[in-house]
Image (spheres, grey):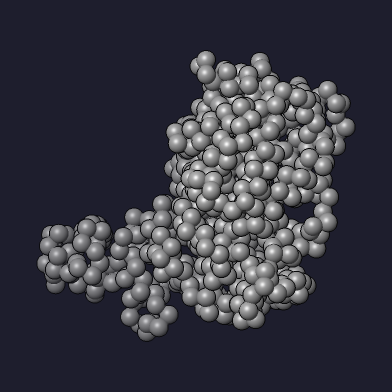
Amino acid sequence: MMMENREKSLRIEEMIAALPDAGNTGKVSPEILADISKRISLKKMPTSALTRFWSLGNVQTKIALGYLAYRVRSSFVSAGKKQKLLNETHLAAAIRLLATMGYMRGAVMKLGQILANLPDVVPDEFAEILGALHFEAPPMHYSMIREVFVAEMGREPEEIFASFDKKAFAAASLGQVHKARLKTGEEVAVKIQYPHIARTIQADMRNLRFLLAPMRLSADWGSMTEYLVEIERVLTIEADYEQEAAFCRQAGKLFERAEGFVIPEIYDQYSSRRILTMEFIPGCHLQEFLAGNPSEELRNNYSLLISRFWARLFYSAKQIVADPHPGNFIFMADGRLGFIDFGCTRATSVEEQEMLAQLEIAFLEKDPAKIDQVIANACLYHDPSRMSLVQLQVIREVITWQFGPIVSEKLYDWGDSDFFLRGMELNLEMVQKGCSQSMPLCIWTNRMTYGFRAICYRLKCQNYFGRICREERERAQNG
Amino acid sequence: MRITEEAKNQNREKIIKAAAMLFAEKGFEETTTRDIAKAAGLATGTMFNYFPSKETMAMSMINEALLKGGADFVTRRTGEEEFAEELFLFITTGLQRLRAMHPFIGPVLEKSLSPFARKATCKEGESAREQHLAVVSAIMTRHGHTMVPEFLATNIYWSLYLGILAFWSNDDSPNQEATLAMIDYSIILFARMISAADPVAGGLSK
Ligand SMILES: Nc1ncnc2c1ncn2[C@@H]1O[C@H](COP(=O)(O)OP(=O)(O)OP(=O)(O)O)[C@@H](O)[C@H]1O
């Protein structure tokens, strides 16, 4: 697959030559580039991990840019002058390429901030950064919306709906969302995808990967191919609203509105691969919710709902919410929790489920040897003795941070900044120590954990997380 | 015996229909004028009284479609569109009418609308160009885009438009969605070019 991509991609020299002058685009400030080259010290760069994080696509950029910034600052281990220069060139070029991708604007701006702040960012900033980095599709005017409707549905929005707001009320990562009313009276949210955006992103990502590839120096490039396949797959799923609708419907069956969960109804007859018409869920997002100074009770209650939501999808549907960013949760006025984005849920295979179950058992039994064995499997070494002690140690800690709460009976304080920051640090350490080889699944479990913990951290909530997980595990076992 | 106006129109119609069918079936290059005459049930010589070449037939079809597209545009326009949006609506509405010709339009446009072709080669092509540009000029005037001399603006526009058509004729993405993105970007580019004072005037509404 890599070879194929290489052929399709531009040659590096061509790509660098074709890049607009960074100073002129106004998108990447010359300061950022200057800062980068200044910070590139005499250190070698374990780039396979870096490249992976860069090329992950959607989410990935969220956490990824943090890693990148960290790398740029501190992870260049000594390399020859020539290699250093090469790294600099490619990294600068990659950032400039990134800057030409309109849908990464926000991410690039954030990158500048992160570069300026890491590792001095406080946990609150970190949590916000995780939530804020996103793809941004170009905005569509109403004439474009009409074209997409005519192409997808054969009719104009005005023929389909009783009313349709010409201006979007929210941005989506691959498009935008409009409010409308069905002829039968229901209020709906209509998500519309910018034409061809997924393929554009895929092509750009290929170029980006290619641009960064020469920087790779460590040996675990091998598992890269697998990751790439994985990422392409997920982006493809995310771009297909029919799949999203199917996931949404499947998940909807698991949650009762009386329990406090609201998963939107999907209106199939007004949906297609590029248009998703669903029940409108009134309410606000996390930031606005917190701005209203909610009581501790309310916050804890939401944390229960969010935790249960996660756990039920995980145990009963065997789904991983790979993109649990705050924009996907709606805090409704009546205290219920709306969840609106099933674009980035990932089904787990039997093999992966087996691995996760083994890990859980190992933790429940507090059996270090078993834990190490599962880690070795997940990292594709299959035998702990084939891993370095340093690697094993870091991953053990990461997994403990991730899995500890799941198997614990104690009350967790998710607003504890030391705990939250420890997780962030561990992740950086993992990258730094070159522990990047793992099952593709781990990208998503990682993202899922960090995404949910960032939300709970901002909620400053407490709950008996392990109990919720146990209940949901049992619920799944009992069908 | 003089043939009536009505019979003439009928013959024209027959030829265009036969040609459209054959172009779609066999491709433009593979279809001969003899094939068309045969399918239309006319003598080749008679057919040449109506159309001197298959290029003119194809271009007549395109012309007709674009004229219909122009009329569609007038009815579809809400009057609320900003500059870039209105231009977008005009181009895409025209393309909707051309859709049936998508399979064979590439080589026809290359022959009839090429900026390098001598003007006299295809008067249908020339008239399509003039009509199209008249609408574009009107849109520019309506939105107050008079900074750049009109002949310059329309020339820049025309090369972009040909580029869009060329791209569209080769676009095999679902529903030619790649072309939609291409049109969007091209128009934003064009709007920036011709609004020297305000680089984003008439651009995105969001
Ligand atoms: N059913 C709905 N009811 C109310 N608001 C909605 C609904 N669907 C979407 N929205 C609004 O649109 C925004 C984007 O929707 P959604 O998250 O589904 O898009 P997305 O393409 O998956 O983007 P992202 O990756 O940014 O989540 C949401 O944050 C929310 O504000």
| Residue A275 to residue B48: above or below | above
| Residue B136 to residue A329: above or below | below
Residue at 82%, 46% (x, y): give it.
A124
Q: Nearer the viewer, residue B194 or A104?
A: A104
Residue at 78%, 40% (x, y): give it.
A419
Position of residue A1 measured from the top left corner of the image (x, y, whole percent):
41, 60
Position of residue A371 measured from the top left corner of the image (x, y, whole percent):
59, 37
| Residue B118 to residue B47: above or below | below
Indicate left or right for A159 with A458 as reference.
Answer: left
Q: Is residue A12 visible?
A: yes
Residue at 57%, 18% (x, y): give it.
A474
In which quadrant of the rendered view does residue B97 lie? Answer: bottom left
In which quadrant of the rendered view does residue B43 lie? Answer: bottom left
Position of residue A350 measured from the top left corner of the image (x, y, whole percent):
44, 33
Position of residue A390 measured from the top left corner of the image (x, y, whole percent):
65, 53
Q: Nearer the viewer, residue B192 or A466?
A: A466
